[in-house]
Image (tube, helix red, strand yellow):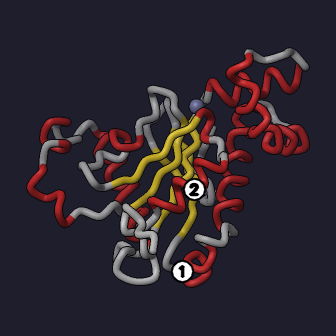
Amino acid sequence: MFVNPLQNNPSSEGRNPATPLQAWVRITSGNSRWVRGGSRPIGGRFNRRSSLKTKRPYATVLSCIESTTPPELLCDAELGDLSVIRSAGGVLTPIISDSIALVSTAPLILILGHQRCAIVEAAYHSLSTGETPPKNLRSIIQSLTPAYERAVKSGGAEPAETMMRHQVALTVRTLEVDPRLSPFVQSGALAVVGGYFSLDTGKIASLADPSASYL
Ligand SMILES: [Zn+2]
């Protein structure tokens, strides 16, 4: 019998006992510390090996690969707090989906889009002008095309930002109905949440919160 190397057994002991809301509060409170400049020194956060045996991640984060968006730093997280998966523009591919399903023992999956995403902007430019993109962007742009089509329908003054938000929302929906995750979403043990990281303010906000200011 195959044994999951990450001991992913979400039906019982593998799942972090915290609720999705508690996990979200930890994300936002850590981010608030980081925004205020009150983060702990990096050496202090990432060298606490003594606590690793009991550590379980409280959230899984899918974010963009851009160097300005490292979730561990943005959330002032310690070693073992977050399972982080990154892809260009935060696109969801079969390998990324499998990785999320494999690693997700935490009660929260955060899909973290960000302001001025250069990859989404490049994809928007290519799709809106018809210009042939560089070879290494083609599969990424293909993955972002449904978000582009929704952004075109939505209109607005910031189409690439709109496209990024659609990409986050589409990814949330796709994961919510993933058969490996949906039973836990339906029971309330797991939440898949769209988030937005502002480069201007440093803040992470929920894209589900209509009162949040994203632009
Ligand atoms: Zn990006």
> In terms of image quadrants, where is residue 151?
top right
Residue 179, numbered circle: none
Viewer-nearest residue: 121 or 178: 178
- Identify the residue position indicated by label 2 in the image: 98
Residue 92 pos. (x, y %): 65, 47
Q: Quadrant of ligand 1?
A: top right
Viewer-nearest residue: 69 or 30: 69
Residue 6 pos. (x, y %): 37, 62
The N terminus: image quadrant = bottom left
**Nearer the N terminus, badge 1 or badge 2?**
2
Give the label, 1 or 2, closer to the camera: 2
Residue 14 pos. (x, y %): 36, 74
**Lateral position of residue 85 relative to residue 56, left or right:** right
The Cα–Cα distance between marks 1 and 2, rounded to whole angstroms, is 21 Å
Label 2: element kind: helix
Q: Which residue type carries mark 2?
A: Asp
**Lateral position of residue 59 relative to residue 183, left or right:** left
The C terminus: image quadrant = top right
Please tell me how crowded label 2 is: few (under 14), some (14-19), or many (20+) other residues with Cα within 10 Å. few
Residue plotted at (48% across, 45% down): 85
Residue plotted at (45% across, 76% down): 10
Marks 1 and 2 in Cβ contact (< 8 Å): no
Label 1: element kind: loop
Q: Which residue type carries mark 1?
A: Gly
Residue plotted at (9% across, 55% down): 50
Please tell me how crowded label 1 is: few (under 14), some (14-19), or many (20+) other residues with Cα within 10 Å. few
Q: Is mark 2 within 8 Å of ligand 1?
A: no
- Identify the residue position indicated by label 1 in the image: 188
Residue plotted at (88% across, 38% down): 152
